[in-house]
């Protein structure tokens, strides 16, 4: 039996791991699996959307073998000796979630973390990254409108779905700004998806640096453009991921050619920073809006001094004081750094996520894990760290 948790993390998250459509597929195709839905007043999908297709609405999930949520679970709500699937944010020794891991260990829980559900080639099987990019780039365009007073967009979370959100862009007319996106994965793809609705011209990194344009343009930088090896050997992406300290930044020339910067990259703390505090003071620095969709605090992009929230998405960075300030002052940088962007379009992002779970994970979860998909993502087994996550021992013990 499978239970869908009511989300309890604050600020509230309206996403779900299993949508009604996917719940029906489970019911129709896994005869031995029953789905129970814990009632929630905030969930993007209502109880009647589940009950009308024959799924069970029940506040008590003790009968369930697998309990699925999205974000971290409230400590007192854990049911001992069950298997939980959610984003625990413990695998990187995140200090704020140490107590969470300790509680699950104490309760004899098996924890399967979505972040570590991968195929044999270590490619992630489920993620919300595309939706972070889709919403984050929309918010970047929204922030530019607020700063310049050229237009005023409806907030993404106020839209019914993606189509409704993109329709808000139909009347946006950007001046000839230069927009820069860093990243080569799902998040950057999502950002480009939104910008394509504006029909913004895509230009090469070379043209971005050397040409002027009489229309808005966007350039997407993959890692080989924003870092280079210190030994001047040829760039190799796998080498960069494994040896980030052997690289130096080549990003600054692009930053000095940019009006709106959308950060969509994966960043290792050992790799070069994108923007240091002193960079904002350089002659010719003209970035006015930064949509930090990756939201790696401070060390990647100096102006991202905190994450923002859906309810309050924008703040200002004063490059002279290096402190938070009003968002739209002439000399300040306008920052959008929401750390749960997919939550602004919960129905769309949940459907994508649930489909990926159904197609890529549930055959192994409900059947034989012949490819090790579940095994690789299991942090705790009956409250004990698995071999793959044994490096968390000191963290779990509080050392």
Image: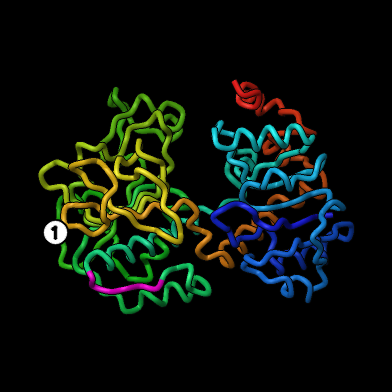
Question: In the rendered structure, which segment of residues is drawn in magenta?
Answer: 149-154
Image position, residue 72 (x, y; %): 63, 46
Asked whether, in this view, residue 110 is left or right of residue 33, the answer is left
Given the current orientation, which residue lies at the most extreme bottom position?
171
**Quarter containing the C terminus:** top right
Q: Is residue 146 above or below residue 77?
A: below
Judging from the image, what secondary structure is the residue with disc 1 in?
loop
The quadrant in which the N terminus is found is bottom right
Which residue is identified by label 1? 212
Q: Is residue 70 visible?
A: yes
Q: Quadrant of residue 116?
A: top right
Q: Residues within 10 Å of mark 1 (few under 14, many from 20)?
A: few
Q: Is residue 153 magenta?
A: yes
- Asked whether, in this view, residue 102 is left or right of residue 264, the answer is right
Q: How many marks?
A: 1
Left or right: residue 378 versus residue 318 is: right
Predominant SS of the magenta segment: loop
- The answer to whether residue 118 is seen in the rendering is no
| Nearer to us in this view, 266 or 207 | 266
Is residue 178 placed above or below 101 in the rendered structure?
below
Q: Position of residue 115 (x, y in %)?
A: 60, 43
Q: Residue furthest front?
A: 76
Q: Image point 27% across, 43% down: which residue?
A: 323
Residue 346 is situated, as x and y percent measured from the top left of the image, at 56, 64
């Amino acid at each position: 039996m499978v239970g869908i948790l009511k989300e309890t993390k604050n600020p509230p998250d309206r996403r779900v791991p299993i949508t009604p459509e996917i719940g029906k597929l489970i019911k129709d195709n896994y005869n031995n699996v029953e789905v129970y839905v814990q009632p929630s007043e905030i969930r993007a999908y209502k109880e009647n959307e589940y009950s009308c297709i024959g799924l069970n609405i029940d506040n008590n999930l003790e009968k369930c073998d697998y309990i699925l949520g999205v974000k971290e679970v409230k400590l007192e709500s854990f049911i001992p000796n069950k298997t939980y699937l959610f984003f625990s944010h413990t695998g990187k020794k995140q200090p704020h979630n140490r107590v969470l891991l300790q509680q699950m260990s104490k309760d004899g829980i098996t924890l399967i973390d979505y972040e570590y559900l991968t195929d044999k080639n270590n490619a992630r099987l489920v993620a919300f990254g595309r939706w972070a990019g889709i919403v984050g780039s929309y918010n970047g365009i929204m922030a530019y409108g607020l700063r310049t007073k050229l237009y005023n967009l409806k907030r993404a979370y106020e839209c019914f779905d993606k189509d409704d959100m993109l329709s808000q862009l139909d009347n946006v007319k950007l001046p000839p700004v230069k927009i820069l996106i860093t990243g080569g994965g799902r998040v950057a793809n999502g950002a480009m998806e939104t910008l394509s609705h504006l029909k913004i011209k895509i230009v090469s990194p070379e043209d971005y640096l050397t040409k002027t344009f009489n229309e808005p343009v966007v350039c997407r930088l993959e890692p080989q453009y924003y870092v280079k090896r210190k030994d001047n050997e040829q760039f190799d992406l796998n080498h960069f991921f494994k040896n980030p300290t052997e690289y130096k930044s080549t990003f600054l020339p692009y930053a000095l050619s940019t009006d709106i910067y959308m950060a969509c990259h994966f960043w290792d703390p050992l790799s070069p920073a994108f923007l240091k505090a002193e960079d904002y003071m350089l002659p010719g620095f003209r970035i006015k809006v930064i949509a930090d969709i990756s939201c790696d605090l401070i060390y990647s992009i100096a102006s991202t001094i905190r994450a923002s929230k859906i309810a309050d998405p924008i703040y200002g960075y004063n490059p002279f004081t290096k402190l938070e300030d009003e968002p739209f002052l002439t000399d300040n940088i306008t920052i959008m750094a929401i750390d749960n962007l997919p939550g602004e379009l919960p129905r769309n992002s949940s459907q994508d996520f649930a489909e990926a779970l159904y197609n890529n994970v549930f055959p192994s979860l409900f059947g034989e894990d012949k490819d090790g998909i579940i095994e690789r993502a299991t942090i705790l087994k009956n409250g004990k760290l698995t071999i793959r996550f044994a490096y968390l021992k000191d963290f779990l013990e509080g050392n």
